[in-house]
Amino acid sequence: MAVYSDEAKCREYMEQMRWGGNPTCPFCGMNKPYKLKDGKRYRCKDSQCKRNFTVTVGTVFENSKVKLSVWMAALYLCTGHKKGVSSHQLARDLGVTQKTAWFVEHRIRLLMGDPEPDVAMDNVVEVDETYVGGKWDKMTRSRRKKHQESGKDNKVAVMGLLERDGKAKLTVIGTNTFKEVVRQHVAPSAVVITDSHSGYVGLNQEPTHEAVNHLAQEFRRGIAYTNSVEGFFSVFKRTIFGTYHQVSPKHLHRYCAETSYRFNSRKMTDAERFEMAISNTKGRLTYNQLIEKK
Ligand SMILES: [Zn+2]
């Protein structure tokens, strides 16, 4: 917090992380731009391009009224806390409104996305499913009525996949079948371990598949156990119930990304975790995209 208290230092740090001391135009990729007098902006040297830019263009920090020093503090708090920080707590810590803190946190969750989403999981992969949300008795009467009238099941199924000695991932199952989700994330050469849920029946034809029958009191058979992925779920549930209390199905995939990030970086120091998130600054999320406003 002390190191990144000042705007100029934060900017310098961002430039170092993003460009490694070699500023590059985000529009055309040209190096060595002119530095403008305000100390923030650069102008591209390319005669066709000539555009002005700052280090935040094309990142989650672009066009934000929130100061860079506040972003850095928010990033430090969100990546450092084991079970996340609620937007109310973050608002108090940073001296901003809850609405701002909520938006800042969702943008930060974008940085927590899997840096290698296309790398399939391999070796031994434990797979399990869990359900989030939907306790009728905990809802207000009007909310419950709205949900019952919509006729939709209020619970959302989430699949956890954990490669032993590798990365772990949480993903919202949505309209896919269990097998489709497994095939999407796991290499055909992997050994997949699940419980005896009927949704996984038939997997054994492709990746090697082992099922542990929890109903028949079987929990471990050689390498066939799902205890690690169940531990991962317990972290997820503690994050959801303990910190955020209520998560809308619309945003659930973002909380999944956050928990996965936290689990995968659990052996890193706070500083390493912070740097991993900040080096993942590609992409942008506008407020309207976030609330899915048409
Ligand atoms: Zn350019």
Image (cartoon, grey):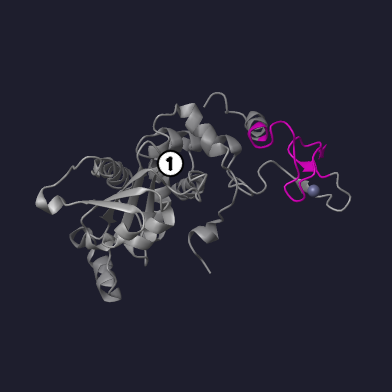
Q: Residue at x 21, y 58 (%)?
A: 138
Secondary structure at badge 1 equals helix
Relative side of 223 to 292, left or right: left
| Residue 71 is at least partly visible in this image | no
Residue nearest the viewer, comparing 191 with 44: 191
Whether residue 247 is visible here, answered yes or no, is yes
Q: Is residue 33 left or right of residue 245?
A: right
Above or below — where is 74 with respect to 199? above
* Image coordinates for residue 248, horizontal then vertical, percent: 36, 58
Range covered by the magenta-colored residues? 15-44
Residue visible at 76% across and 34% down in the picture: 39
Magenta segment: does it hold 19? Answer: yes
Total numbered badges shown on the rendered structure: 1
> Left or right of 1: which side holds 157?
left
- Residue beneath disc 1: 261
* 151 vs 42: above or below: below
Determine if the magenta segment contains residue 18.
yes
The image quadrant that residue 8 belongs to is: top right
Q: Is residue 128 left or right of residue 24?
A: left
Characterize the magenta stretch by its predominant secondary structure: loop
Q: Residue at x 31, y 45 (%)?
A: 236
Q: Work out which residue is located at the far left of the displayed protein and give it.
A: 216
> What residue lies at 37% left-to-right and 36% top-to-bottom?
165
- How far across and how far down the image is residue 239, in percent? 32, 43
- Label 1 is placed on what type of residue? Tyr
Q: Residues within 10 Å of mark 1 (few under 14, many from 20)?
A: many
* Residue 281, image x, y percentages: 58, 43
Query: Disc 1 beta carbon < 8 A from ligand 1?
Result: no
Q: Residue lying farthest right?
A: 47
The x and y percentages for residue 26 are 72, 47
